[in-house]
Amino acid sequence: MKISFKRRSQQLLLPSLIWTVAIFSGLGITGCSDSEVAPTDNFVKIYNNELFDISYNPLDVKQTADGTYIILSTANETDTYLLRVNESGEFISDTIISTPYTNPLSELFLVNDEYHFFSMDNVTLSTYLLKVNLSDSNQVPELVQSFPGIIYPLHASQVPDGGFLIQSYNRDARSTSLTKLDAGFNQSWQSEYEVLEDVEASIIAKFAGTGERTLPYFTGASEDGSIYFLNGFYNFSFSLLFVNASNGDLLGTLNGLREETGVSAAVHLTGDQYALSRFSFEENFILPTGTINIRGNEFSGEIGGNEFPEMLPHARVIVKKLMINGIDAIVYGTETKSKQIALYIYDATDGSLINAKYFGNTNPYEFGNFSLTDEGGMAVIGRTFVAGRFPRVAFFKMSQEEVNSLVQ
Amino acid sequence: MSTSTDRKKKLFIHFIKIIFTYLFLMLLVADVHGQEMNKRTGLIKGGIYSKDRNNKRKFESFAGDASSGGGSTRWGFGIKGGMNLTQAKPDDQFSVFSYTIEPEHTLAEKEYYKSSENTGFQVTFIAKYTLFNNLSVSLQPTFASYKYGYESNYAWMDFENNNNSLFLFFRHEQTLNYLEAPLLLRYDILDAPIRPFVHGGAFYGRLLNALKEVDVTGQDNASGATEEFNGATSTLGMDDQYVKSQYGIIAGGGISISLGPANFELGVDYKVGLNNIVDENNRFTDNTLISGSYDILDNMTLRNLSFSMGVIFGI
């Protein structure tokens, strides 16, 4: 006789319950829950298109108040290119601004909650200030101001009083020029530093993107804003000049040797201490805490530093002092001989190397810039050659956890 | 290196713990069930006593339950193996590329291969306990190797000179090796030497390793002549790109054939993964993967159809 269905069901009930509990408690014990990560925390994006003969070279990336990003770049070496992407790095819109606003300078500046940048007139070689129009879906920037007296603009930076420095080249006087603008973009003063020879060919090479290298023109200010510095041609050589912030008077120099030796990046730390990188022919050196006599007349080749053989000869270098996870850090962004983007992170208090981070592999990557994001992450941009040949903007977004891990 | 070894050792210990937990629970169930049966019917080796309508005790043999090994036993152990077909089911798709101009010749999203193109294999150890004549439970620790693949194609064109163009075709094949512990409830439909059966349950899998093979081919028209090329095939370790656990439900059936002390079985199982197997934390951490083959993984679950044959012996 067969056991009745009812009886079988009763006999089955207990084991079934135990098995069910066992299965699901087993799943719980072994921790197979999904890891949830917001797509805005970290990502890598390459802004590609099918155009065969266009190239991009990004200069700066900034996060806007709504969490999206603006990337300032050149297109085809001279045109100004603005790219806007969303919080996850997905493309929103872009525009190529051709004549007359060509050769955008160095970085985006936040003024009254709006991003601005400088560019050059392709015919008159004078300087423009443009404002990124975030409300315009076509990203066409607005002209804010013209500076007809600033020719061949090479670099711009914002200083502690909210004003701006613009380095330029005066081809008539054969001198490097530094112009101080106040926070309202009115000219405070302009100073000339004699080169004593015609270096216009080198200047043009920078704008045209020709030649073997781009010289590291830059400007900056001390923490308290009392000293300004500029890196450019002076007295037959590519030199770092320290000037009085109130009138531009030359205080001291860190001389280069023609175009072969000089400083490639600098940021003021405290007192006479600067974080620098320098080049000597094809070698690169990093001085995370170098003491500089800003009122002296010294040779940049004698200030020492740690040689970084992995850095590309004549590498683009940007150094910033950042607060990361409560630590005063000095972050160098640059590029390596193996065509990777590299970040070197130092402790600003003792100059010790904390970490190094590399981006890119297999296909070439070139360094553009980096900036911290609102949530404590970091945006790093550069240029990659997709399929080894198509220059495109690459965007690496690191989460706060990743950035914090750089200083641990 | 030592970290990797330690991690594998920990994983192994972890898995052994899971197996022993399940076995313990299985024995517990068997014991509880056995006591219940003894209490109600009186169990002796080879069968049970039950009462007929006239209240007479009657012996019911397990001999007819060949699924337990062809004899009058409750436990059966065996092994089976075979091939499987996997279909990846992407939930959210991701790409390294974001297009500034809508592409015309590029596949903007990955194109996943059909399951018939994704052939893997599995080897399973079977531990089975018979609850009733036709009903049994089994734990089936399995080494399963799943494969799935997809294509991504890219194009660059000179629209002023049509002779200038480059096409790249990437074929990505992923191999995922899991150690799984499916737990199944089985019902044998007939009491006969040749019996169809159905079963269903849940499975838990622990990722052992993951590999990816990328094959690049292309057509380069930029030199004025068409050049077809085959790039190198590269193999990448992908362990960090996947979460370590996969779980889901499983259903299947087959035919069991009793031959002496053994049961030979042919079966088909369909598994439905319930969790995203991709580690979202690590999606953008592999430089080689992203920069070299421009590839990142989509969030996905796996569906798997497996065919197997094997043998079970009663003990």
Image: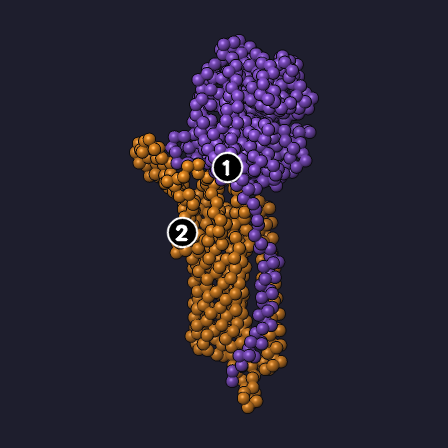
Chain colours: A purple, B orange
Q: Residue furthest bottom?
A: B54
Q: Few, some or many C-alpha atoms within 10 Å of disc 2 (few <14, some 14-19, many ≥20)?
A: some
* Distance CA(mark 2)–CA(mark 1): 31 Å
Query: Is the residue A184 above or below the residue B193 in the image?
Result: above
* Left or right: A260 as drawn, with respect to A385: right
Q: Mark 2: which amino acid?
A: Tyr
Q: Quadrant of residue A232?
A: top right
- Residue holding disc 1: A85
Relative placement, left or right, of B68 versus B150 is right
Q: Nearer the viewer, residue A187 or A221?
A: A187
Whether residue A367 is situated above or below residue B127 in the rendered picture: above
The chain holding disc 1 is A
The type of residue carrying mark 1 is Val
Residue A8 at x, y percent in the picture:
55, 77
Residue B300 at least partly seen: yes
How many other residues sit within 10 Å of disc 1, few (<14), some (14-19) or many (≥20)? many
Above or below for B241 versus B67: above
